[in-house]
Amino acid sequence: MFVRCARLLRLRCRMKLPLPCAMWLIGMGLAATPAAAADVLAGQPTDLSVTVYRAPYRNSGSINLDYLAGFALVSETRTVLLPAGMSRLRFEGVADGIEPASAIVTGLPSGVIEKNRDAKLLSPSALIESAVGKPVELLRSSRKTGKTERLTGTLLSDADGGVVLQTAQGIEALRCSGLPETFSFEPRSDLSAHPTLSVLVRSPIAATRQVTLSYLSRGFDWAADYSATLAADGSRLDLGAWVTLANSNGVGFPSARTFVVAGKLNRENGEVQPIDLGGPILANCWPRGSTSDSPMILRMDRELHFDSLTAGLPAAARAMSLQEAAAPAAQKVQQEQLGDLKLYRVPDRTTVASRQSKQVRLMDRSQVPITTVYGADLAANQLAGPAPAYRLLRTMNNAANHLGLPLPSGNVAVFALHEGETLLEHESGMRDIAVDEEFEINMGASPDVQVSQAKEASTADFAHAEMLPLVPGVGALRSVKLDDVIRVDISNARAADIQFELRLQLPPGGRVIRADHPMDAKNGRPIFRLKIPANGTATLRYQRQHTADRVT
Amino acid sequence: MRVPLLCIGWAILMQAGSATAADRVLSVTIYADDLALIQDRRDIEVKEGRQRIEFQDVSAQIRPETVSLTASDISIVEQNFDFDLLTPAKLMEKAVGREITIVRVNPATGVETKEQAQVLATNGGVVLKIGQRIEVLRDDGLPVRVIFDRVPENLRARPTLSVTVIGAHSGTRRATLSYLSPGLSWKADYVALYNESDSKIDVQGWVTLRNSSGTSYDNAQTLLVAGSPTQADGGASIYRPQPRRPALQEAGTESGSRERLGDYYLYPLAERTTIANQQTKQVSFLDVQGVPAEHGYEYRNRWLGTAETPVSAKSVYSFSTSAHAGLGDQLPAGILRFYMRDKRGDPQFIGESRIDHTPMGSTLSLATGDAFDVKVHAIVDKRTRLSPFDWQTDMRYELTNALPRAVVVKLIQDGLWGDSSIKTESQKSTRRSAESAEWAVTVPAHGKTTLTASFETKY
């Protein structure tokens, strides 16, 4: 029993009742426990840097503000006054999405003994939970007189949301009597209001240090948002882009050096211990039904539930702006090579605020020559009814075409001029494009150009079938058995000639043997390039080698 | 004085025979896969004869079937694990048939009236017998305090372990309580800073341990075991649609100075530490500077097929864990994060990769991500049937490099099944296994290289 008392006293000491406790402890000559580490709070960040990485599994398209799946490397420099000896250095206000395993602390005098992140935050339920088995003060007030009675007691249990305590009078449950009751707790420093990382260090001397803490944090993302403005004749476009970055953490980063990184990084899906945000003190009681309760109570519950559902949060405001017209003076990010990635540096310090999306100019290029091509992707020999062709704006990402810079993935909005006004024409996703790669913007389906594929002649009636010319490169293969003649009809309802490309998908080992138009190959697939006259039609016929489609 | 009064309250609550905590030595041994062995040595007071000893501060996730208590001159009768929790509802339920004290509070005057009552039932509401009358507790909504005189024996704030023992004689003795508990786990986390100018890496290793067991372990001696002893339950295999890219290129054959347990390596923490509940804790175990590392590119074509668009090659860093020109240590499984300095010297994150337990002397090759500027486009130029079960596939690989320096790409063609042979190729390949062929292709700065190969496959 004596030992119990001593332990209790020690507990009270830890809760900062210094003087009498210390005397007690000395008096009792307790076995020495390791010297308690002094609690040192690191100063507010003096220098911040945030590098935002994209969601690793998104190949194209813009960010989703409701779920930012990317991450960021955050570096904070803080000034620390370290006393001699062991101290627990606390960094308050790190991002809630911190991956504690990634934290790096540099600038400390000697080795870091350990780094900790407590997932528990200061909350009513955390206070109760940590007070179980410990002395608490119960406050009970009279509604009539306003007088508050203070009783010391011990918290016995907080299991399943109910609170049981013991006072000198006996055992009671919190807030079951109908009287206003609450607890008053000892002051404590081990629960933080904000996510906190703490480091245990030993310093030989007292010193002031600049300490840098770096860590990876979830809840960030960025994408490039391009806007292209087509010239009236459709032969050139002006291409501009914003870097859109966003932070969904509850912590903001004021006046931070800001970077974004393009390229695909390998990320392991490491599990991070979620932060326990705590909750209210529930103070569940024993059954409190009265003689007037009716079985209707169940239905009331359901209605309540319904109410709480409809009172949902409003949808997050979309801060993304489609509208173009970048201020010509907008400062652009500077690109540099980082290993095999592209690093973009925001020229000036900026504030990456909590739950904010922010845009910085990425690039502006004008008069980029483009070709407009219509196309269709068809599986060879599969009949397809009239379906619209897609339109592509095509150029090469090189200096000759006024480009020649890495284009990070994102979203492209294409605007066209219409009676002096700029209107949105189409929007599509775009993958990472390196220098000297072909750059295509998909403009979506074009109902004016329709493509259909049909069987024209069956090989059964070979004698009467028209013989198509051989495809160049194919020798006279009289012995090769051919499939049906397939006819592709393309119609053009536009008032101008168009370039059309038909790409065929063949089964493994399949070959096109005969065709009435010149055939080429692109990316390992046969391609026919045709010119369709204004308001006209074109017909293309081909015949492939007979192959029973292989089942793998 | 307030303090002694509290102490008396505490002692009554804990009751005689409960384990005391003087000179307690806690050792926690944590295995890699969510398992820990906790050994709790402390002095306990044992009386002569039969008694119950309670251990309240054990892991909340204790596996009670693994508990063992050893102490001199005691014999163990039984071990119990009680998980009936102390809540107001349970307290009232267990009071059925017993006397409680109710205190009625007059809402107008605040005057308290004390009465004895017997609890008859707690079904939906509390029914009391006061004197010869029956009442429903607080049916009128007026304040009524209920005071219980004791907590029923089986109700506790936390699940509790108790051991009934017979002491040969009374006195204090050293006892060791040991048990297994899930909820504690650890892994390694590495920080590698790659220096591009001299191709060297600095590597720091940290063990990251997590406690979600519901209990804190104060001032514990901590030992980490790099290995996972098979547990009878669990251990379900993980579905992986594609095999991982192997990180280990060559398994090492060197021994270090680390402690071992059987075939596992041990990582004791130098100092006692407090592992708080819901805490993630990191302790350093490795710090090596200037290890030679190689940066390269790798592209793996899984079968003899065409890709719709050029695909980025993987950016790969390889280094040795050998004592000579390497990290010089075994590496417990974990995640290695790569950093590189930008033009102004700030370290930036460039990707991460998982490694398994790696013996010393191994060669590791870790992919950090996709190279933005180095791409490979695999194309089937032609597939011809040579005979009913014999096919020829002409492959063309277009490798492009938008970097201002030449790069070497390790191009791997998988899916050869051992029955494919290379008939012609524009560059000599090495066949690392029947399954795959490999080329080291040099791509000039801002340039393009085309590699062709023709495969004959029996099918």
Image (cartoon, rainbow, N blue to C red):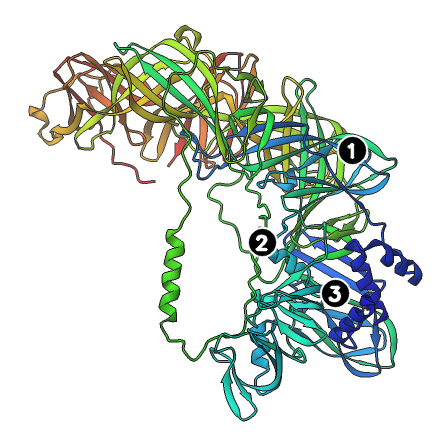
Nearer the observer: mark 1 or 2; the answer is 2
Q: Quadrant of the C terminus of chain B?
A: top left
Q: Is residue A473 visible?
A: no
Query: Considering depth in this image, is B159 or B270 the residue closer to the camera?
Result: B159
- Measured from the top left, where is residue A250 in percent x and y? 55, 39
Depth check, front residue: B168 or A356: A356
Q: Is residue B230 found left or right of A70 in the rendered image? A: right
- Mark positioned earlier in the residue sequence (1 or 2): 1
The chain holding disc 1 is: A
Locate the N terminus of chain B and report the quarter of the image it occupies: bottom right
Mark drawn on residue B178? 3
Say if labels 2 and 3 share a chain: no
The location of residue A541, given as percent across then percent down, is: 16, 21
Residue B166's place in the image compared with A498, above or below, is below
Image disc number at residue A243: none
Question: Between marks 2 and 3, how big is the CA–CA gap?
Answer: 32 Å
* Element marked by disc 2: loop
Q: Is residue A199 left or right of residue A312?
A: right
Q: What residue do we see at 64% from left, 38% from top?
A: A102
Q: Disc 1 to disc 2, how far (Cα)?
A: 33 Å
Dot 2 corresponds to which residue? A278
**CA distance separating discs 1 and 3:** 38 Å
Chain at numbered mark 2: A
